[in-house]
């Protein structure tokens, strides 16, 4: 009987540890995958616009749309495709190959929407 109670107690403790570990994994899921800036080198103000999800089109806000100067990739972001029109229409280029800040060239400064992809 005591052995059964001990087994139940140990199982409950291990389950709590596993659930806590999963919480740490899922809490980073809601962080932005990249940031778009209206200044070179990720300069502010105004603050960078967060690109919230992978594989989803993000329309840039008015103060950055048509004036994109840099993108900052978070650690798991591989690259972002840039589009001339909102709704990810008319591809104009892409930047990436890992985390860091990427400055735009004259062909991609008029970007109005962005779609990012993770590392595999």
Image (cartoon, rainbow, N blue to C red):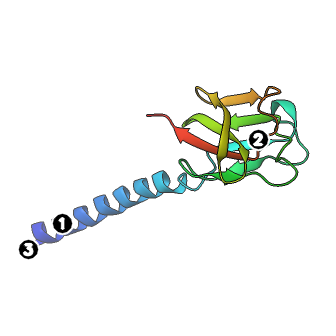
Q: CA–CA distance between discs 2 and 3? A: 69 Å
User: Which callout, 1 or 3, points at the residue further toward the start of the chain?
Assistant: 3
Alpha-carbon neighbours of circle 3 within 10 Å: few (<14), some, or many (≥20)?
few
Across and down, in percent, residue 112 comes to: 76, 47
User: Which callout, 2 or 1, points at the residue further toward the start of the chain?
Assistant: 1
Residue that badge 1 annotates: 6
Q: Are marks 2 and 1 in contact (CB under 8 Å)?
A: no
Residue at 71% across / 50% down in the picture? Answer: 50
> What is the secondary structure assignment of the residue under circle 1?
helix
> What is the secondary structure assignment of the residue under circle 3?
loop
Q: Residue furthest front?
A: 90
Image side of residue 84 versus residue 41, left or right: left
Residue at 86% across / 41% down in the picture? Answer: 67
Residue that badge 2 annotates: 111
Residue that badge 3 annotates: 1
Across and down, in percent, residue 7 comes to: 16, 64
> What is the secondary structure assignment of the residue under circle 2?
loop
Above or below, comparing residue 120 to residue 59 in the picture: above
Please state which of residues 54 and 89 is positioned toward the viewer in this rendering: 89
Image side of residue 1 versus residue 100, left or right: left
Q: CA–CA distance between discs 2 and 1? A: 62 Å
Above or below, comparing residue 114 to residue 59 in the picture: above
Q: Residue furthest bottom?
A: 1
Image side of residue 59 versus residue 37, left or right: left
The N terminus - image quarter: bottom left
Indicate which label's residue lies in the foreground, 2 or 1.
2
């Amino acid at each position: 009987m005591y052995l059964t109670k001990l087994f139940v107690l140990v199982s409950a403790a291990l389950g709590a540890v596993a659930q806590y570990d999963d919480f740490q994994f899922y809490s980073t899921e809601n962080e932005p995958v990249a940031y778009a800036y209206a200044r070179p080198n990720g300069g502010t103000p105004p603050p960078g616009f967060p690109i919230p999800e992978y594989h989803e089109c993000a329309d840039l806000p008015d103060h950055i749309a048509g004036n994109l100067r840099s993108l900052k990739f978070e650690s798991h972001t591989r690259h972002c495709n840039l589009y001339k029109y909102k709704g990810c229409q008319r591809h104009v280029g892409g930047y990436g190959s890992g985390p860091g800040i990427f400055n735009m060239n004259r062909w991609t400064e008029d970007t109005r929407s962005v779609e990012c992809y993770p590392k595999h």
